[in-house]
Image (tube, rainbow, N blue to C red):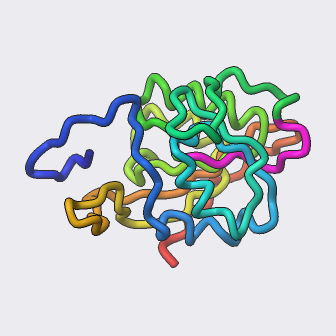
Amino acid sequence: MGKRETEKKPKSPRDYYATIDPDAVKPLLPYVDIQTYIEPCAGAGDLIKLLSKTAICADAYDIDPQTDSIIQRNCLTLTENDCIGVDLIITNPPFTRDILLPMIDHLSSLRPTWLLLPADMMHNHYMKPHLEYCDLILSIGRLCWFKDKDGKMVKGVDNYCWYMFDQSEGYEPQETVFKGRI
């Protein structure tokens, strides 16, 4: 999954990497406390479980749900009506550029949107127009995406961040603030 791996693993279908590492949400918790959100790339609901003590998941969707509690739906079909009573959108989206960029545009037009993405993305040329409406980037560091044969989580080799994009109604563009690891 990472660019520094000595042996490349095959890419997971649909960029599905379960958010199983509790460290993934630690920097995000102060920013989502007691808020309601939609999880549009929910997979098996792992991120929802990690946020369950802090934020309320109003609805969870995935194009290919991994459990019956997730509604099958493409997140690009979400509308303002789906977001009534919801404060945020929070997800670990696919990282493939052709899928990710339309998601950033669409979801951030509905509600402020937190996306778990590789830290290096902020340095890619294709992200420049999207960073114009990215208010905050929270560093996480390296995360565990897999478990070994004994069930122990294995730390990855790439760093990750939470990116908060906002193009919702009334949004005023601001300079992006980067917060280092806590």
Q: Does 84 appear in magenta?
A: yes
How many marks on residues? 0
Q: Furthest-left residue in view?
A: 6
The residue at 18%/52% (across/down) is 4
Where is residue 130 drawn, in percent x and y?
58, 36
Q: Furthest-bottom residue in view?
A: 182
44 sits left or right of 77 in the view: left
The residue at 76%/68% (across/down) is 33
Q: Does 93 appear in magenta?
A: no
14 sits left or right of 27 in the view: left
14 sits left or right of 8 in the view: right
Q: Nearer the viewer, residue 133 or 145?
A: 145
Q: Which residues are magenta?
A: 83-91
Where is residue 93 drawn, in percent x and y?
51, 40
The residue at 31%/56% (across/down) is 146
Where is residue 35 drawn, in percent x and y?
80, 59
Q: For residue 102, what is the image quadrant? A: top right
The quadrant of the image that shows the N terminus is top left
Q: For residue 95, what is the image quadrant? A: top left
Q: Furthest-front residue in view?
A: 68
